[in-house]
């Protein structure tokens, strides 16, 4: 699987992308709202679940590596977890190394993932779960047309404390109208 944007190439993760995946999950700035620190073995187990061939009817993440076209440097990952039956939905996710922050790569890559999800795959709705307080992620989603659909109180345990989750959604019709 390969998606191309103006400045990025988004391509299915492979075994060769382990160093990037490890860097993302070991960087405190990247992982702060995603998970508590994980051991290398736990990170490896997550990585292995991203490697099999993706199918929208399956139960695994479509995990795409974001690479700058100029130079080929990997800057992050993006993709979605399908829930095709019965609701034709998927949950989007992304993580970008600090070196890629502030360059618009999040929005550029998310727009490509949304286009693929809605137009090539036929999803009805894409969702996102964001730990309350992650303002950068919230702004990114809203800039791509996602709407806040609710807040789940004390929904996620992180750093030994309970946190709320913001639930976002974007319907295919809204995406098409916003193009």
Image: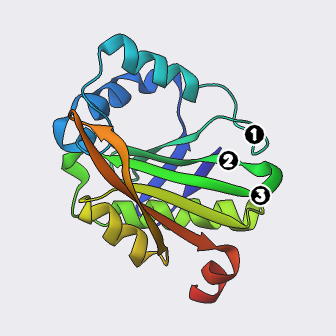
Marks 2,3: beta carbons within 8 A: no
The residue beneath circle 1 is 55
The residue beneath circle 3 is 87
Instruction: Give the camera-side residue of 179 and 49.
Output: 49
Mark 3 or mark 1: which is in front? 3
Examine the image and state in which quarter residue 55 appears.
top right
Instruction: Give the camera-side residue of 34 and 76.
Output: 34
The residue beneath circle 2 is 82
Name the spot of residue 82 as percent of width and height, x first.
67, 47
The answer, for residue 167, to whether it is visible in the render is yes
The answer, for residue 75, to whether it is visible in the render is no
Marks 3,1: beta carbons within 8 A: no
Q: CA distance from mark 2 to mark 3?
A: 10 Å
Q: CA distance from mark 3 to mark 1?
A: 16 Å
Q: Which is nearer the N-term, disc 2 or disc 3?
A: 2
Q: CA distance from mark 2 to mark 1?
A: 8 Å
Residue occupying the far front of the picture: 153
Name the spot of residue 4 as percent of width and height, x first.
54, 58
Q: Which is nearer the N-term, disc 2 or disc 1?
A: 1
């Amino acid at each position: 699987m390969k998606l191309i944007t103006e400045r990025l190439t988004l391509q299915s993760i492979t075994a060769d992308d382990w160093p990037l995946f490890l860097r993302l999950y070991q960087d405190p700035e990247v992982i702060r709202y995603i998970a508590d620190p994980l051991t290398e073995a736990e990170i490896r187990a997550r990585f292995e679940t991203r490697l099999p061939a993706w199918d929208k009817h399956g139960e695994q993440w479509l995990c795409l590596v974001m690479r700058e076209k100029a130079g080929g440097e990997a800057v992050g990952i993006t993709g979605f977890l399908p829930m095709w039956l019965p609701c034709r939905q998927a949950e989007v996710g992304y993580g970008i190394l600090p070196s890629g922050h502030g360059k618009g790569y999040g929005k550029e890559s998310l727009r490509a993932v949304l286009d693929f999800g809605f137009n090539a795959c036929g999803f009805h709705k894409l969702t996102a779960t964001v730990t309350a307080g992650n303002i950068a992620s919230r702004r990114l989603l809203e800039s791509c047309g996602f709407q806040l659909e609710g807040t789940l109180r004390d929904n996620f345990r992180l750093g030994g404390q309970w946190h709320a989750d913001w639930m976002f959604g974007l319907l295919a019709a809204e995406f098409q109208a916003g193009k």
